[in-house]
Image (cartoon, helix red, strand yellow):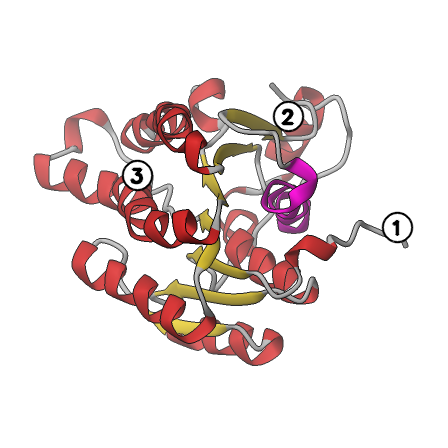
Amino acid sequence: MPEFASYPSLKGRTVFVSGGGSGIGASIVEHFAAQGAKVGFVDINEAASQEIAGKTGALFLKCDIRDVKAYQAAIGEVAGKLGAITVLVNNAAHDERHKLEDVTAEFWDDRIAVNLRHAYFAIQAVVPGMKQAGGGSIVNFSSVSYHTMTPNLSVYQAAKAATIGMTRGLARDLGVHKIRLNAITPGWIMTQRQIDLWLTPEAEADLMKAQVLKEKVYPADIARMVLFLASDDSRLISAQNFVVDGGRM
């Protein structure tokens, strides 16, 4: 079994993760907990989240990230219980398929809320504490889908492309406070949802043709990149986008 890095700078650090109850988010929570960080996370899936919280000792709060007021209050509650949040991971998203002709203004607003808006207001909520703490690290999530032009996903792709612009713009604004912002662009990550919905033998064969590394990418592969970007090992890295996709792009 391979051995992976540990980061002493993460021990005791307060980390907040959105969408930490399953998939990539759950792996992120598990990896930070294993580093000795104090982890708080939100999700709407209470059963799955309680299981992750029980396994890791992380603090779970049920919250719908579309409700900005409630979401910022949840972030404040985590900070009040665990200490100032100096690592924010804006992971929560939902890649619901849709066709152009079926998209309504209401659907657009809801998908932008789920895939982009919450990240901005989470940043707004944690920045005062990061300033007082002398700095912090924020990791946002984009998606390979807008590069590969995955069909029937245009609103999601719009949000994930905008994430890169948001990351770079705020990196400039907040760098003076030693607050770093970076983005991760995952490839096709083998969460249980992806496996159940879309992983067919034909799709896997096409993926292996596209990737230069002939292995499927799993949530832990993303979580390890998050750890690096959160740690002091990456202290002079900001305004960047890291693609973790097995060499697909």
Dot 2 amino acid type: Asp
The answer to whether residue 122 is magenta is no
Residue at mark 1? 2
Q: Position of residue 155 (x, y in %)?
A: 27, 30
Residue at mark 3? 116
Q: Residue at x 28, y 46 (%)?
A: 124
N-terminal of the pair, mark 3 or mark 2, is: 3
Instruction: Tell me the mark number nearer the camera, choosing from 1 and 2.
Output: 1
Residue 237 visible to the viewer: yes
Dot 1 amino acid type: Pro
Q: Position of residue 19 (x, y in %)?
A: 42, 57
Question: Whole-Å distance between the Cαs marked 1 and 3?
Answer: 35 Å
- Mark 1 falls on what kind of element? loop
Residue at mark 2? 206
SS majority, magenta: helix
Q: Mark 2 Cα within 10 Å, few/some/many (few <14, many 20+)?
A: few
Dot 3 amino acid type: Leu
Q: Residue lying furthest left in this view?
A: 105
Is 169 in front, or is 55? 169
Q: Residue at x 59, y 33 (%)?
A: 203
Disc 3 + disc 2, Cβ < 8 Å: no
Q: Mark 3 Cα within 10 Å, few/some/many (few <14, many 20+)?
A: many
- Mark 3 falls on what kind of element? helix
Give the magenta part as a residue range: 219-234
The answer to whether residue 231 is magenta is yes
Q: Position of residue 209 (x, y in %)?
A: 70, 21
Question: Whole-Å distance between the Cαs marked 3 and 2?
Answer: 29 Å
Q: Residue at x 73, y 56 (%)?
A: 8
